Image (cartoon, helix red, strand yellow):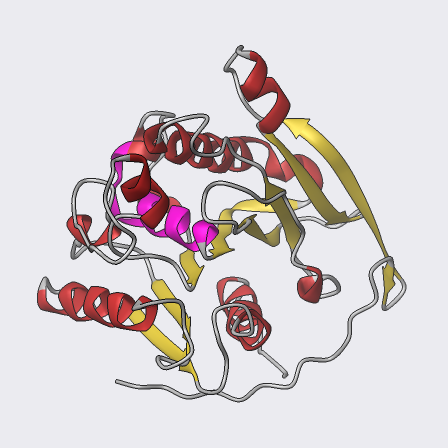
Amino acid sequence: MRRILSVLMATVACITVSAQEYKTADNILYTTKTDSYSKERLKLDVCYEEDARDLPVVVWFHGGGLTSGEKQIPGKLKGKDCVLVGVNYRLLPKVTIDKTIDDAAEAVAWVMDHIADYGGSPNKIIVSGHSAGGYLTMMLALDKKWLMRYGKDADDISAYIPFSGQAISHFSYRKMNGIDNLQPTIDEYAPLYWVRKDCPPLVLLVGDRELELFGRYEENAYLQRMMKLVGNTTTELYEFDGHGHGGMVEPGYHILEWWVKKVDNKPFEP
């Protein structure tokens, strides 16, 4: 079902919000890997409210086609009573895609183990990200083996909310294997390959189908359809009319904030 949203977001202060002081712990090494590239890249930032406890948590994976980009905190969620985590991961083509997905899983496992130290609840974690970050979000949600490697259950995450994630095999992975960008493939590195009934809420956010990157809307729509056919009832799809691949992030924050309140059993006041 096509769902169209038009959202106006308020500007949020970055340092002090409603007299609540924010702190950021920067460049925390989250990995046990020992090679130099891992030590360089596998770091995260945590933005948290001083003296807060048991808050919802948003883990955010940056975009950049899996080949570029830097960790970032989704600033629109500052002041929304949640802990924010921005994650770096190793990039293609310096590593293969399995290494990158493994990095994402290790970061989420670290958050599950340590976020209580920053006032977050390990029982209220939302995994999210834009574009390449949305793809990583999907892979962790649907293929349980990645988090299982770190002794974690993907189903213990409260929700997965990918922003314009790729549901087929990622184009940068295909390029590394000599496959043209417009030649779609679905293999073990495609979220679509892993459709399953017993997945936590999967909230698919995409831009306007006529403005999005290639067939990004249609990929997500097909993923939602297949999830429904295997019996999953918690996968949702939102299409933001008038917004392209980058522009859909702004209205997407509205949905992400709603889920932050939802997992915390609090009313959402837009």
Q: Is residue 56 above or below residue 119?
A: below
Res 46 quadrant in image = top right
Instruction: Write the residue at 35% across / 33% down.
Output: 97
Instruction: Write the residue at 74% across / 50% down.
Output: 52
Dominant secondary structure, magenta: helix
User: What is the x, y in percent for residue 114?
Assistant: 59, 32
- Taking the image as shown, residue 11 lies to the left or right of residue 243, namely right
Instruction: Write the residue at 58% across / 13% down.
Output: 36
User: What is the x, y in percent for residue 92?
Assistant: 44, 34
Instruction: Write the residue at 20% across / 55% down.
Output: 184
- Taking the image as shown, residue 185 lies to the left or right of residue 124, namely left
User: What is the x, y in percent for residue 249?
Assistant: 55, 69
Res 42 quadrant in image = top right
- Taking the image as shown, residue 186 lies to the left or right of residue 256, namely left
* The N terminus sits in image quarter: bottom left
Res 215 quadrant in image = bottom left
Q: Is residue 17 above or below residue 116?
A: below
Give the residues in magenta. 132-145
Q: Is residue 180 above or below residue 244?
A: above
User: What is the x, y in percent for residue 5?
Assistant: 47, 87
Nearest the eye: 195 or 16: 195
Nearest the eye: 61 or 161: 61
* The C terminus sits in image quarter: bottom right
- Taking the image as shown, residue 91 lies to the left or right of residue 155, namely right
How many marks the image carries: the answer is 0
**Magenta-drawn stretch contains 124:** no
Q: Is residue 199 above or below residue 46?
A: below
